[in-house]
Amino acid sequence: MGAVDEVKQKIDIVEVIGKDVTLVKAGRTFKGLCPFHSEKNPSFYVYPEQQSWHCFGCNNGGDVFSFIMKKQNIDFGEALRQLAQKAGVVVPTRFEPGMESEEKQRLYQVNQAAAQYFHNLLLNSPAAKKAQDYIAKRGFSEQTIKDFQLGYSLESWEALKKYLLERDYTEKELTTAGLIIEAEGKKPHDRFRNKLMFPIFDVRGRVTGFGGRALDDSLPKYTNSPQTPLFDKSGTLYGINLARDAVREQDAAIIVEGYMDVITAHQSGFKNVVASMGTAVTEKQVNILKRLSKEMIFALDADAAGAEAMLRVEQTSTEALGEDILPVHYRNMIVTFTNVPDIEVKVIILPHGKDPDDVIKEDLKTWKNLVAAAVPIVDYTFDMVTSGLELTTAKGKSSAADKLLPIIDDIKDNVRKAHYLQKLAGLLSVSERDLEADLARIRPRQVRRQGRAPETKAASVRPLVSSPKEEYCLALLLQHPKLKRQDEGLLPEHFENSENREIFIACQRSAKIETIRKKLEPAIHEHLDSLATRSLLSNELEQKYAQCALELREKFYRSLEMKIKTVLALEAQTGGTAAELAKLKELGTEVGSQLGKVRAQKIRRRLKQRE
Ligand SMILES: [Zn+2]
């Protein structure tokens, strides 16, 4: 099964949309206020059985992918990666390692050229005065500036662009590398202007992207490269190229948040430090580190590590993922902790209000001691939970057990699990056997909770809604591009399946399979190939295509009609307002007439064939 199907099976559309829209159950559907147009009465519906959604106000609809794409204004690939991460599905990346295309090589080169250009400006240009002052204030040495290839981008719309075009890079390459921005109606211009530049390297020391820091009060303070074929923020660790060997030698990686923290740490001799790019630490990042060491130490500031925050983790992780409420660090740890069992995750708690940069600058010893005193995340959680409780009282004991047992139950290594069970029993002065009984008692709740975790997702697999008509139509178009000249009124929205929709769109723009392939996410390649190689009879192609397109349109309108009917029946029952009912009825009539047209066309075709 392909990654797309796997994601669909593991993701519940109601749960996903429910994060953005307050949904109320209505019969076999859920309804809410449409996020795509403004309205007072809900006309936005989610259909769990079809795993689809539709808004009768603005007439948008589709599957879970199209919802995310529209809501966040992102492309299919990005939506897929987001949902895949949620579902714990591995999605093939656009460029497989080892299979480095010439195109990709060019992008590395253009990035390297840009980094060199910025670096030279910082070292030599009078225009870089502000950046030079800033760096001096930070106390970065010449060696550090060189090691990290720090740079400066001029306050100009075209300086970098001109420089690189003169060196025979194309505008398209610059855009693809994220170095220039194509704004509508304007000339493409430099993305980074008047910024202190931090080139971002991969583990092999190649420049994949850039971070830029504003040198005045302008916001945002930091600008990063966008997602490109080389740069994926979620799979990037700042400083990894310089930290790699140290992480291996010291068998531990320290993860901090900012560029400055990394640079200061390295300059002070702590070379096993990397930054998580200011986002939640992702499994991709953990996987990079895992190859170097099995110990990861998170540096947390005291505020984010507050006891209250910990309790919020407890509540939200049992109910929903609660991504918006949680401090990033905690989410990181929970993710890391539950998804990658064979690593040791520790935490360092920084003094109140300070980041690693401050701590190291003030006193190297403090930092050293902090690192030496890093505690395993489970022990840390024990401390956090129990510090606010009166453990001599029955109430305090049961409260501690309630909060800590689920965490113990999550530990996959049995020896460690037993260790923490013992620890808890000791803390509460109760027998381990009692705790084990409690553990068994909380399991039903646990199962529900873990139903959201990747490993056990399979328990709630949804049947795939297959769409043979969509696929047949696409197979025809892919194998016989000439058919595209025959206008059968097919539109992208007639394809309910997002991956089919993507293929249809790519197919409209190009006839060659190879070009279409390049335009599509690798996760859809398998599906594309199966359509492109499906065996089809090659007689009466035009008729077959016409027929199939008609049927597809019919299917689209029929499904819409069905949805309207469901909603009408529901609204009539629950006393929807007259205006709403009228609007729906009107829409129903419109769809009905479209359907009528399609059917008439079908009949005409049949008659013609008989002639
Ligand atoms: Zn709407």
Image (tube, grey):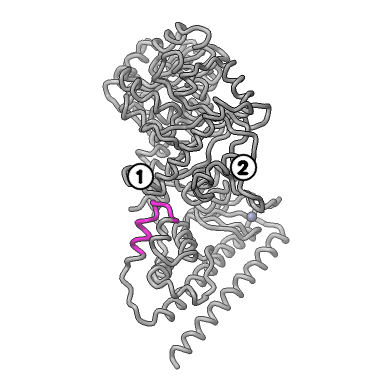
Against 545, is 457 above or below? above
Q: Ligand 1 within 8 A of label 1's CB?
A: no
Which amino acid, by three-letter code, is at mark 1?
Ala
**Image-quadrant location for residue 197:** top right
Q: Secondary structure at mark 2?
A: loop
Magenta: main secondary structure equals helix
Q: Quadrant for ligand 1?
A: bottom right
Tell me the CA gap for discs 2 and 1. Answer: 52 Å
Q: Give whichever of 308, 292 is nearer the camera.
A: 292
Q: Ligand 1 within 8 A of label 2's CB?
A: no
Quadrant housing the C terminus: bottom left
Q: Nearer the viewer, mark 2 or mark 1?
A: 2
Q: Is residue 402 visible?
A: no
Q: Secondary structure at mark 1?
A: helix
Disc 1 packing (10 Å; few <14; some 14–19; many ≥20): some
Q: Residue at x 54, y 63 (%)?
A: 493
Against 23, is 267 above or below? above
Query: Which comes before the other along the chain, label 2 or label 1?
Result: 2
- Residue 522 magenta-drawn? yes
Q: Give whichever of 203, 189 is nearer the camera.
A: 189
Q: Residue at x 65, y 34 (%)?
A: 155
- Residue 391 magenta-drawn? no
Residue 310's mark?
A: none
Q: Residue at x 35, y 65 (%)?
A: 532
Q: Which residues are magenta?
A: 519-531
- Label 1 belongs to which residue? 458
- Label 2 belongs to which residue? 158
Q: Residue at x 56, y 27 (%)?
A: 122
x, y percent for residue 46: 54, 53
Against 87, is 462 above or below? below
User: Residue lying furthest bottom in this view?
Assistant: 611
